Amino acid sequence: MNKIKKNIYLIGFPTCGKTTIGRILAKKLKKNFIDTDEKIEKTEKNKINEIINKKGLRYFRNREKEILKRLKNLKNSVISLGGGITLSKNNGYFLTKTGICIFLDAPFKLLKERILKNYFNRPILYSKSEKEVIKKAKKLYLRRISNYKNANIIFKTKDKNKKDIVNELIKILKNYAIND
């Protein structure tokens, strides 16, 4: 099955499962796994929320672009990307042209449940009330959704478990191995 030469990029709203699904998918496909947020945290020696709080969102977005540029020559990898990386049209174009970009499209109801469990670790969503957190999340989701839909593959996760999601993605990716 590892006939796919291009990188596989996973995009989607925070808490949609990019990192979790990415790790499992990479293992099954015998590919490297990279999480861009983890890479940024490692190079900055700080957590994402601290980076944004101390240096600002613009600084963080620039770091995302730098990481993406460095991945340009990487092969044989599944890459989980930060939820806002597609806000730059150049990034979105890069993803769909240099790899197979998969939008993990989780229903907002599920995202909302997951966000409420740990929104305090997400500075762009943080607020003192849960109602305000969800209001911010919905606004952000609506702003980003059209960018996510530019992916090569839109995969609706619905209420599927991790194993089913990965197995279904592998079936879909077989078509890309033929045309790669």
Image: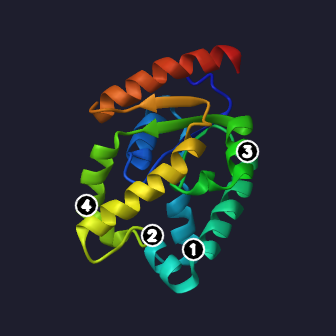
Q: Which residue is mark 3?
A: 94
Q: What amino acid type is highlighted by mark number 4?
A: Leu
Q: Closer to the camera, 25 or 121?
A: 121
Q: Tell me the quarter of the image containing the C terminus.
A: top right
Residue at 56% x, 29% y is 153
Q: What is the CA distance from the residue labelled 3 to the residue labelled 1? A: 21 Å
Q: In this rendering, which labeled residue sits more in front, label 2 or label 3?
A: 2
Q: Which residue is mark 2?
A: 124
Give the percent coordinates (x, y) of residue 174. Answer: 55, 17
Q: What amino acid type is highlighted by mark number 2?
A: Ile
Q: Which residue is mark 1?
A: 57
Whether residue 171 sits left or right of residue 85 in the image: it is left
Q: What amino acid type is highlighted by mark number 1?
A: Leu
Say above or below: 136 vs 170.
below
Q: What is the CA distance from the residue labelled 2 to the residue labelled 3? A: 25 Å
Q: Are marks 2 and 3 in contact (CB under 8 Å)?
A: no
